[in-house]
Amino acid sequence: MYEIFIQEGGFSFVNAGQADFVYPEMPNLLDFMQLSNEKMFYVQSQNPEADFQTFIQTQTVIAAAGGLVQNEDGDLLWIQRLGKWDLPKGHVEEGESTLVAAQREVQEECGVQDLTLVSKEPFMSYHAYWHRHLEKAVLKKTYWYKFLSTKAQKLTPQTQEEITWVGWKPLAESKTLKTYALIERLLTEGF
C-alpha cells in the first residue's frame, strides 16, 4: 500500500474496490490531517502508485532519517518524547546522506556510540504534520535503517529534543507499546 500517516491514523492509496471506507477524491492534505488523527482512510485509484507519486509531488517534503536499533539480545532501542513511545529519528541536514543522518540522530537522541549497519536498503515512510515555522502542512519522508548495537553502554536522552527516556525493550513488548500508527507499521514491516 501507499500510505501517509497522521498521528494514529492516515490515508492510503488503494486499487478500486479494495477498501471498505473510501474517500471519494484526491485528498487535500490539510483536510486529511483534520479528519484522520485516529483512523485510516482510503483513496480508490486505478493506479495507486502513480496517484501516490502525483500527490507526493504536490506537497512540501522534508527528509528525515532514523534507526531501528537492536542489541545483542534482540531488544529494540526506544525513546519517550512528549509522552509517546517513539524511535530515534530526525531531519537530514544539508549535504548529509540519509544513512549518516540516521546514525547521527540515533547517537544524538540516545547517546549510542557503537552502531553497525544491518541493511543498506532503508524502509521509507511518510508522515504528515503541521510545520509551525513554515505555517503549513508538510510531509516528512523518513528513511529507516536497521542497526545493531550493544546494550552495555550508557544511554542518554537528548532532553533539548524533549526526550525524557531512552532504553531497550524486548521486541515482543515493543510491538505492544502505545505509539504512533507509523511506528506500529514499521515494526510489522521492519521485523
Image (spheres, rainbow, N blue to C red):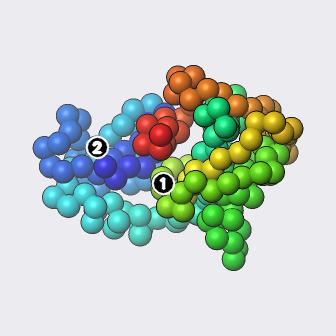
Query: Which of labels 2 and 1 is toward the front?
Result: 1
The residue type indicated by label 2 comes to Tyr
Residue depicted at 65% across the width and 47% down the height: 148
The residue type indicated by label 1 comes to Phe
Please tell me the numbered disc located at residue 123. 1
Q: Which residue is mark 2?
A: 42
Give x and y (percent) for residue 138: 54, 58
Q: How many numbered tags mark residues here?
A: 2
Is residue 183 shown above or below 13? above
Q: Secondary structure at mark 2?
A: strand
Q: CA distance from mark 2 to mark 1?
A: 22 Å
Is residue 172 shown above or below 94? above
Residue depicted at 67% across the width and 38% down the height: 71
Residue 84 appearing in the image: no
Residue depicted at 20% across the width and 39% down the height: 19
| Direction left: furthest residue | 17
Give x and y (percent) for residue 171: 56, 29
Q: Secondary structure at mark 1?
A: strand
Res. 38 image quadrant = top left
